[in-house]
Image (spheres, rainbow, N blue to C red):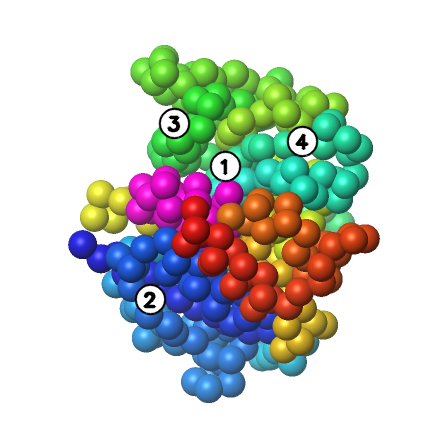
Amino acid sequence: MSFKVAVLPGDGIGPEVIAEAVKVVRATSDKYEFEEAIIGGIAYDQTGHPLPPATLQLCRDSDAVLMGAVGGPQWENVQPASHRPEIGALLALRSELTLYANVRPAKTLKSLLNASPLKGDHGMIDVVVVRELTGGIYFGEPRERRDNGNTAVDTCVYTKQEVKRIAEQAFAIARTRRHEIVSVDKANVLETSRLWREVVTEMAASNPDVKVTHMLVDNCAMQLVRYPGQFDVILTENMFGDILSDEASMITGSLGLLPSASMGPSKNGRLFGLYEPVHGSAPDIAGQGRANPIAAILSAAMMLRYTFNDNEGADRIEESCEKVLEAGLRTADIFEKDCQLVSTTKLGDAIAEAVKEG
Ligand code: NAD
């Protein structure tokens, strides 16, 4: 049986890091088929739209999507704004594919412990933040100015159904890990948070194999810095997740290492997801072979784990990244004294080699 992956390299360093991710997945197995399409600025230049219909159709026809990054200075002022890569491609793709769950692991790699702003073992973190992506205050209506612009209004809305479907994703992910969820809210103040806690509490009762606790968001922000190792899966709403996932990422120390997934409803009995590095298109280093491909490679590992239930392949990729870093190979962004400076391709080659050996 083969699985179809839509590959959207995008702009800037996107094609460079995605080529390495595809190479590494191929090293695990030949059961994955890849089909490429254009997205972002390059698609705008070629077709007049950053998300051409053929690209969207390919995503719909695939089991998963692996994306690089979109955008760059030459498309920042494209008019109308809806044709800018970040809006017209990225946000449009998330909404077209109903990707309501954003999943961001933050894991300190032992060989890069020094990169963490928290010193020594204190900086060890291995958490997955599961953030609701399409509801809450970022989308609630009305949002407007009143009183001649002197009053601003945003609205926060959640339905039980929205909370339930994101919580289901968190339970599924917790089952691939330590079976522990910390659900984060502000239930001492907000009505939406009280609904959130009610729904998660009900679901915890019917999923007793997963330990669920509740934490207020302000406490969670402190606890992440005080003792990040206490967290396994953090489940939270859109705005809290936006902030906490960045805080958790920062503890690992490098943008070039962080993968992510945006997941939607299951398709053919599998979790459908768009997998992409957290970083952007890095126009300042594009085309120079300096990009760190690890975030893209780890995004591909997430794809194997979550969409294709291929834990063995995902483990091999993650362990190979660790192995190659432990051997001292580094791209410029994570270079340390006594290490060997290598290009994007060389690092990808070494990881693919380690996967084959593993
Ligand atoms: P960025 O993440 O592209 O770059 C920030 C800094 O980190 C740069 O100095 C860059 O060189 C470095 N960097 C990023 N990824 C790296 C990697 N893999 N290896 C080594 N160094 C890396 O953020 P930015 O500069 O704010 O944005 C650049 C463009 O990317 C903008 O057009 C922005 O809108 C877009 N963007 C796209 C996405 C996405 O497609 N998901 C996300 C963020 C930004």
Of badges 2 and 1, nearer the viewer stands 2
Tag 1 secondary structure: strand
Q: Is residue 168 left or right of residue 335?
A: left
Q: Which disc is residue 140 wearing?
A: none
Q: In this view, does 283 lie to the left or right of 101?
A: right
Q: Which residue is drawn at 77% across and 31% down?
A: 120
Marks 2 and 1 sit apart, C-alpha to C-alpha, by 27 Å
Q: Is residue 253 above or below residue 222?
A: below
Classify 10 Å Cα crowding around label 3: few (below 14), some (14-19), many (20 and above): some
Asked whether residue 264 is in view, the answer is no
Amino acid residing under circle 2: Phe
Tag 3 secondary structure: helix
Q: Which tag, 4 or 3, sits closer to the chain's start?
A: 4
Q: Which residue is drawn at 49% across and 52% down?
A: 354
Q: Which tag, 3 or 1, sits closer to the chain's start?
A: 1
Tag 4 secondary structure: loop
> Where are the magenta residues, as a range?
297-319
Q: Which tag, 2 or 4, sits closer to the chain's start?
A: 2
Of badges 3 and 1, nearer the viewer stands 3
Q: Which disc is residue 34 wearing?
A: 2
Q: Residue at x 74, y 55 (%)?
A: 339
Q: Which tag, 4 or 1, sits closer to the chain's start?
A: 4
Marks 4 and 3 sit apart, C-alpha to C-alpha, by 21 Å
Q: Is residue 317 above or below residue 193?
A: below
Q: In this view, does 151 lie to the left or right of 229?
A: right
